[in-house]
């Protein structure tokens, strides 16, 4: 985006590119673990249509790319030393995107260092791969020490946020939430995968080559369960953290199903595979409680885009939203260094002064922010209206170009 710009169009282009890249990484990972060409293609196709992956594959966050890199790194444990470094680079990059990649990098490094110890010669490539996988995470910890005086500042922030929200869980719930979520979020993939692998083993279709990649991905599951126990788990859309496991599962399912359908099992077994997986998935889907969907931010994006068009490149924007929607406004505005929310809505912070208590308070608040324009809610529009000219408006938000006198009010 440094090249394409900070517009939503650029973000969507980058997101689409990375989503496609993640699917191609799954295809390459399937080839590395020894899946036939057809099974590798099937794994990539499955990875593209899994609901969790299809949503995250077009989102602005790097979840899809990071998951694809983790799966590639896990598959690299099946490669020799001359190509193991690619897995180290992939996992090192993933650790800079998502924290759940950290245990995968550690597991990869442990396996790779064991291979180095067993190798009679050419140990250096293994050691280099392990180092490359771990250095970015250590650099991030060092960054925490230097800039935040806390090596685990990121974990403590999440834990503090959960406490502020009042999120509490019993030990049993903390131990079972992640495994249950793993199945409930993608029952067709998980249950179908279990059935496929079991029947493949009964049909004597070998799957030992998946042991190492499975160990790398299993480390993520353990990490997430521990995170639940110590209060550092994600507070929204937790299935994001499971995406790399789903993508790895897509490879196992495609490989096992391909072997069975190619003659690794009799027709009765093939039918049992399909029927058992379908029945189990239907049961789980039917019992699954309704989920809170993604929040519709089209109005915030529209008003932020209008501000981007109206305001010159040297003017600042103040944003008033009833929730975290100010992030969407600022993203559409495309210049976060020139935008400031009036309320962060962060439960960790003490209550903020009500900027809309009266007109004078609002004038002083906007002056302290050096704001030239204001995005405000319909609820607060009456207080803000005398301060400027209405430029754009929708059902919930309004954009005001502030009169010059507002900037002259002494805070």
Image (spheres, rainbow, N blue to C red):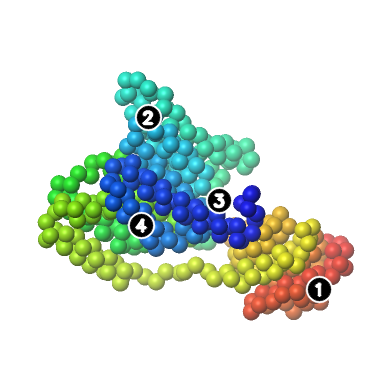
> Percent x, y for residue 156?
54, 48
Distance, label 4 to label 1, CA atoms, is 53 Å
Reading the image, the residue beneath label 3 is 157
Q: Which of marks 4 and 1 is nearer the N terminus?
A: 4
> Percent x, y for residue 283?
26, 69
**What residue is rendered at 88% in x and 63% in y?**
408
Q: In this view, does 359 lie to the left or right of 161?
A: right
Reading the image, the residue beneath label 4 is 45
Mark 4 or mark 1, which is nearer to you? Answer: 4
Reading the image, the residue beneath label 2 is 81
Mark 1 or mark 2, which is nearer to you? Answer: 2
Q: What element carries label 4?
A: helix
Mark 3 or mark 4, which is nearer to you? Answer: 4
Q: Find the residue positioned furthest to the top.
A: 121
Distance, label 3 to label 2, CA atoms, is 38 Å
Mark 3 or mark 2, which is nearer to you? Answer: 2
Reading the image, the residue beneath label 1 is 388
Q: Earlier in the sequence, mark 1 or mark 2?
A: 2
Question: Total number of numbered labels?
Answer: 4
Q: Is mark 3 on a helix, strand or loop?
A: helix
Q: Is residue 30 above or below residue 237?
A: above
Mark 3 Cα-neighbour bin, 10 Å: few <14, some 14–19, many ≥20: few
**What residue is rendered at 71% in x and 64% in y?**
308
Q: Is residue 38 above or below residue 280?
A: above
């Amino acid at each position: 985006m440094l090249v394409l710009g900070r517009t939503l169009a650029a973000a969507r282009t980058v997101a689409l590119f990375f989503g496609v890249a993640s699917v191609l990484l799954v295809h390459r990972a399937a080839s590395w673990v020894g899946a036939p060409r057809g099974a590798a293609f099937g794994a990539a196709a499955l990875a593209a249509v899994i609901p969790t992956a299809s949503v995250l594959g077009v989102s602005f966050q790097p979840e899809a790319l990071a998951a694809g890199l983790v799966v590639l790194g896990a598959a690299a444990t099946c490669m020799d030393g001359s190509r193991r470094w690619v897995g180290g680079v992939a996992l090192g990059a993933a650790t800079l995107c998502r924290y759940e990649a950290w245990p995968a990098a550690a597991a990869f490094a442990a396996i790779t260092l064991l291979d180095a110890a067993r190798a009679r010669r050419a140990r250096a490539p293994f050691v280099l791969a392990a180092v490359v996988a771990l250095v970015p995470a250590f650099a991030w910890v060092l960054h925490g020490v230097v800039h935040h005086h806390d090596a685990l500042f990121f974990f403590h922030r999440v834990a503090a946020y959960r406490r502020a929200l009042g999120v509490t869980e019993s030990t049993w719930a903390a131990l079972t939430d992640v495994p249950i979520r793993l199945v409930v979020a993608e029952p067709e993939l998980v249950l179908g995968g279990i059935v496929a692998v079991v029947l493949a083993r009964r049909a004597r279709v070998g799957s030992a080559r998946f042991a190492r990649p499975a160990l790398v991905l299993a480390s993520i599951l353990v990490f997430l369960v521990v995170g639940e126990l110590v209060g550092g788990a994600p507070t929204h859309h937790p299935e994001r953290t499971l995406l790399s496991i789903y993508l790895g599962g897509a490879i196992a399912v495609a490989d096992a199903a391909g072997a069975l359908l190619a003659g690794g099992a009799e027709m009765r077994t093939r039918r049992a595979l399909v029927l058992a997986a379908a029945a189990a998935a239907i049961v789980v889907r039917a019992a699954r409680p309704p989920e809170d969907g993604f929040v519709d931010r089209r109005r915030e994006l529209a008003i932020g885009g209008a501000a981007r068009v109206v305001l010159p490149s040297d003017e600042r924007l103040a944003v008033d939203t009833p929730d975290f929607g100010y992030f969407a406004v600022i993203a559409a505005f495309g210049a976060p260094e020139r935008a400031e929310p009036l309320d962060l809505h962060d439960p960790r912070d003490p209550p903020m002064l009500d900027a809309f208590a009266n007109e004078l308070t609002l004038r002083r608040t906007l002056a302290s922010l050096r704001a030239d324009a204001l995005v405000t809610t319909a609820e607060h529009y009456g207080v803000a209206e005398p301060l400027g000219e209405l430029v754009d408006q929708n059902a919930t938000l309004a954009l005001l170009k502030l009169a010059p006198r507002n900037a002259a009010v002494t805070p």
